[in-house]
Amino acid sequence: MLKTTISSFIIFFFFSFTYAQIVNVESLRRVTDTSKWSGSASLDIGLIKNTNAIFRITNRVRLQYNTDNNLYLFINDINLQKIEANSFVNRGIQHLRYNRKLTERLKLEVFAQSQYDAVSDIKFRGLLGIGPRLKLFKNKNYRYYWGTLVMYEYEEASDNSISILRDFRGSTYFSFSMYPLENISIVSTTYYQPLLKKFSDFRISNETSVAFRLFKNLAFKTSFTYYFDTNPIIGIPNTQYELTNGIVYSFD
């Protein structure tokens, strides 16, 4: 009876509304103090209804290796969408990040990211960034972090008539993780990413996730993402949002 109820609950909440562009690395980090491999795989199913009916399947894989002074993180996020009867669009992000521990509270972060997003008319976006990450506070149940990076951005739109963009952006974020109960986790991250040569051109995003552990390695996760861009590609709205529900399998 319990398993049937849980299964029905999961199936019901699989359906969601979705839009987003920034991958939230904080929600995918695995906090561990020992040298080990860890990872997770998640599956989300979504239904969108606006001017079209869109069915979406998302698969996200995270792999992390952590030592006393180094952390290596790889994320592969693939999104397949079916629009109406026979049209398909894809969205994908590949993200590689390295952290080097400098002091007990301070780390140096370096990352590279590639991205494509047909919904947002992005044929290709490449990012390279570097900067410090500061641990503001940490105990068993709460963790707070702040980071700021400089990143180089290369962007091509799907419309070939739009020129290629090459710019430097800042990326400042604040993140917190809460574990109020043994089987519940809450992670929230807010990003602010201004164009360094023109601070009136900026992006703001927030992702907040709540995960409920169902079994030892299996959790049900709900995430809401808000994204705002003052200067998106022509024809794309300034504000986008995403609400997803799915299951996550993790190992360590």
Image (cartoon, rainbow, N blue to C red):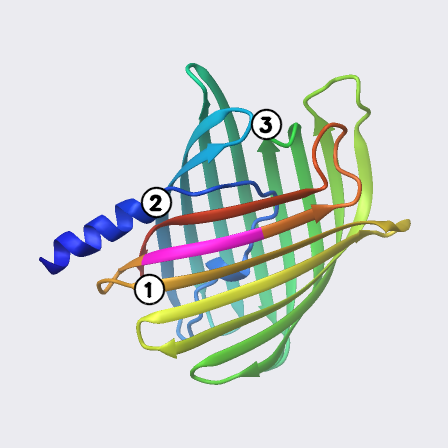
Q: Which residue is mark 1?
A: 212
Write the start and end of the magenta stretch as one range: 220-225
| Side (left or right) of 208 relative to 216 | right
Location of residue 53 with respect to 85 vertically, above or below: below
- Residue 45 percent across, percent down from the top left: 37, 39
Secondary structure found at label 2: loop
| Residue shown at 29% from the left, 46% from the top | 12
Location of residue 191 with respect to 136 vertically, above or below: above
The quarter of the rendered structure image containing the N terminus is bottom left
Q: Which residue is mark 3?
A: 118
The CA span between labels 2 and 3 is 22 Å
Secondary structure found at label 1: strand
Q: Which residue is mark 2?
A: 14
Q: Which residue type does callout 1 highlight?
A: Phe
The CA span between labels 1 and 3 is 32 Å
| Residue shown at 48% from the left, 85% from the top | 139
Q: Which secondary structure class fits the magenta region best?
A: strand
**Mark closer to the observer (2, 1):** 2
Residue at the extreme top: 86
